[in-house]
Amino acid sequence: MTNVAGEMREAVVEVRGLSTRFGDHVVHDGLDLDVYRGEVLGVVGGSGTGKSVLLREIAGLMRPSAGTIRVFGTDVLDAPQEARRAVEQRWGVMFQDGALFSSLDVQQNVEAPMREQLPELARATREALARLKVVMVGLPENACEKFPSELSGGMRKRAGLARALALDPEIVFLDEPTAGLDPIGAAAFDTLIRKLTDALGLTVFLVTHDLDSLHAICDRIAVLAEKRVLVTGTMTDMLKVDHPWVREYFHGPRARAALAGG
């Protein structure tokens, strides 16, 4: 696809005609979305619009009712197991509050994807890589021996991010990463995501309701409304959209505060 500047952009995620139903309840109906290599895409929408559901479908954790999802050119819904496994090794997922295994310490949590996807990896190598990821996300090395219950909310989120980075992914899916954090902690986490994205060349699919995050780190925003992606564009583009929910969200007091803070 070509952008307005005439540059070619590689879509590493392509969603077409996606429909999601839970019984008679329709969440998505004919949803289309592209995610481009190297961008931070913020996905927003009102309650019940299926933001986290869309993330889980792209990441292979839920199956939609209809439609196609291609990641790195592979149809992840119908690919043979071997091809699908190869694609899964190229993404990482961070859930709300980190979603760490409570019975494992941080090091073991970060090692978990390596154990599953790379069983041939030597133990010493796996342990060294896990410690590297822990330090990479700004946690002290001694956090490796701590259990999730011994960590603050912000530390659990960082540990969850370390686990998402365990396999050196090209795409990272983040589900409400700053939810529950105080403004200082949320800003620090935003800065961390931006630094890691730039340093590692990541593509980030970010589900959020945090206007500060949208303004601080997102290259592009996708708005879910009316069971589809209503509009995509930059923060500046969003300010020009004449739709009731978009106008209220991006022109409200919190939006003005976020823009003023930038």
Image: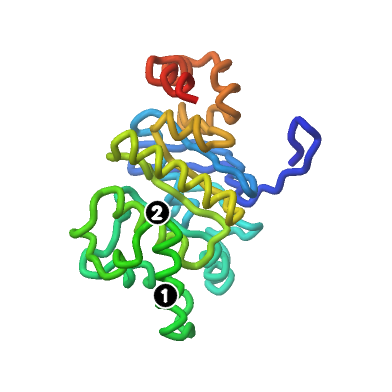
Report the Cα–Cα distance between label 1 and label 2: 16 Å
Is tag 1's residue or tag 2's residue first in the polypeptide sequence?
A: 2
Task: Inspect the image, locate mark 2, and give the three-letter code of the amino acid beneath it.
Answer: Met
Q: Which of 128 and 12 is in front in this view?
A: 128
- Three-letter residue code for mark 1: Glu
78 over 242 or under it: above or below: below
Taking 86 as reference, is 135 left or right? left
Can residue 68 be spotted in the picture?
A: no
- Foreground pick, 189 / 120: 189
Q: In this rendered view, identify the residue nearer to me: 183 or 10.
A: 183
**Extreme-left residue of the structure:** 149
95 sits left or right of 76 in the view: left
Mark 1 Cα-neighbour bin, 10 Å: few <14, some 14–19, many ≥20: few
Q: Is residue 127 left or right of residue 11?
A: left
Q: Position of residue 81 (x, y in %)?
A: 53, 72
Residue 236 in which image quadrant: top right
Q: In this view, does 46 lie above or below 175?
A: above
Location of residue 211 in the rendering, given as x and y in whole percent from the top left corner: 43, 28
The image quadrant of residue 253 is top left
Q: Give the labeled residue for mark 2.
A: 94
Can you identify the residue that label 1 sits on?
116
Q: Give the residue drawn at x 54%, y 40%.
A: 41
Residue depicted at x 58% and y 15%: 240
Which of the two marks, 1 or 2, is nearer to us in this view? 2
Q: SS class of the residue under badge 2?
A: strand
Q: In this view, does 253 lie to the left or right of 73?
A: left
